[in-house]
Image: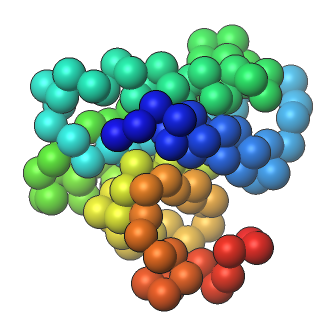
Amino acid sequence: MKRRTFLLAAGSLAVGFQCAIGQTAEKKRIGALFPYPPSDRDMPRRIGAVEQGLAEFGWVNGRNMEIIYRVTNDPAQLRAYAKELVSLNPNVLLAGTSPPLSALAEETRSIPIVFAHVADPVRTGWVKDLFR
């Protein structure tokens, strides 16, 4: 995965996060679900890119927000993690690709889900158009 692509996605998360919850003094929570093996050597870099993108908009993990990461490439575990993240009532959810998006969307319709690396989200029905 190219670093620029992931940073762009992280920046999109930051914008979506701000739109979804507004900028207030209260600590906010993000639930992030990634479809990779837990031992994936690129996970620290992916997490760093997400946190860097959010920091550019003033959101710092541990200071004014909390990010709860779950990582697995097992489909059954993905669904279990999606259920767990939704039960924690985060302000916004982050889906790394289509499988986590699907798992999260099955669990909630009320928590905003920001996603990255989803092929043709309009055609697949995740969004009505690219302007929303």
- The residue at 63%/59% (across/down) is 112
Front position in the image: 130 or 111: 130
How was the colour assigned to the protein in this rendering? rainbow
Query: In the shown orientation, is residue 119 left or right of residue 36?
Result: right
Inspect this view and state whether residue 68 appears: no
Front position in the image: 28 or 13: 13
- The residue at 35%/64% (across/down) is 98
Front position in the image: 14 or 63: 14
Displayed quadrant of residue 10: top right
| Number of numbered labels in the structure image | 0
Task: Residue 79: give x, y in percent of width and height.
Answer: 25, 59
Inspect this view and state whether residue 40 appears: yes
Task: Residue 73: give x, y in percent of width and height.
Answer: 16, 47
Front position in the image: 88 or 32: 32
Which quarter of the rendering shows the N terminus? top left
- The residue at 51%/42% (across/down) is 5
Task: Residue 25: give x, y in percent of width and height.
Answer: 86, 24
12 in relation to 128, above or below = above
Which quarter of the rendering shows the C terminus? bottom right
Query: In the shown orientation, is residue 77 left or right of residue 59?
Result: left
42 in relation to 89, above or below = above
Residue extending furthest toward the top? 63
- The residue at 41%/37% (across/down) is 2
Task: Residue 16: give x, y in percent of width and height.
Answer: 71, 50
96 in relation to 62, above or below = below
